[in-house]
Image: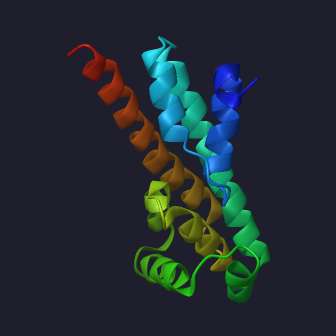
């Protein structure tokens, strides 16, 4: 049985893992489950909460680590780390809003933890950013399907 066949539970697991350094595409699963007629509100909540908890896992890993560890053990390039550092230094915990972005989101959450950004604010802004992404996906798939 594949994770996608587990419905909401599979979506939660994939959403959680895709927010960590493990490459999964929760966006695709949200789109597929939307197309299959799953409840869009439940999909949105499950994906948003799972992805936010995965992002907060990165935050806590960052809180424990050193910049050198990110490159050595997690294979996050110096370029991505530097880009994330720039965003964090400019926007502080508000930068967590952008943790949904592919390519830099994981590093951003790690750097927020390393810089000890306010955990509650990181959680709030991270949830807002990630939930808006899933809302857009659900709406595009749900209403896009009506065009065909």
Residue at the far right in the pictured view: 64
How is the model colour-coded? rainbow
The residue positioned 50% from the left and 62% from the top of the image is 96
**Residue 29 at x, y = what percent?**
54, 32
> In which quadrant of the rendered view does residue 5 lie?
top right
Whether residue 117 is visible: no
Q: Is residue 112 above or below residue 99?
A: below
Q: Quadrant of the N terminus?
A: top right
The residue positioned 71% from the left and 27% from the top of the image is 2
Q: Is residue 72 above or below residue 122?
A: below
The residue positioned 44% from the left and 50% from the top of the image is 129
The residue positioned 44% from the left and 83% from the top of the image is 86
Image position of 125 (left or right of 113): left
Residue at the far left in the pictured view: 147
**Residue 56 at x, y = what percent?**
66, 56
Image position of 141 (left or right of 34): left
Q: Is residue 81 above or below residue 129?
A: below
Whether residue 133 is visible: yes
Image label count:
0
In the foreground, 9 or 63:
9
Q: Is residue 22 above or below residue 25?
A: below
**Residue 21 at x, y = what percent?**
66, 61
Q: Quadrant of the C terminus?
A: top left
**Residue 50 at x, y = what percent?**
64, 40
């Amino acid at each position: 049985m594949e994770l996608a066949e587990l419905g909401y539970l599979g979506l939660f697991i994939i959403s959680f893992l895709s927010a960590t350094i493990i490459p999964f595409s929760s966006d695709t699963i949200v789109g597929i489950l939307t197309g299959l007629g799953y409840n869009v509100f439940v999909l949105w909540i499950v994906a948003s909460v799972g992805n936010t908890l995965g992002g907060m896992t990165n935050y806590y890993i960052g809180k424990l680590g050193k910049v050198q560890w990110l490159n050595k053990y997690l294979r996050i390039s110096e370029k991505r780390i530097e880009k994330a550092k720039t965003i964090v230094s400019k926007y502080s915990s508000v930068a967590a809003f952008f943790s949904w972005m592919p390519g830099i989101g994981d590093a951003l959450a790690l750097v927020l933890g390393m810089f000890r950004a306010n955990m509650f604010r990181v959680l709030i802004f991270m949830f807002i950013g990630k939930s808006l992404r899933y809302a857009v996906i659900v709406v595009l798939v749900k209403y896009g399907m009506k065009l065909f």
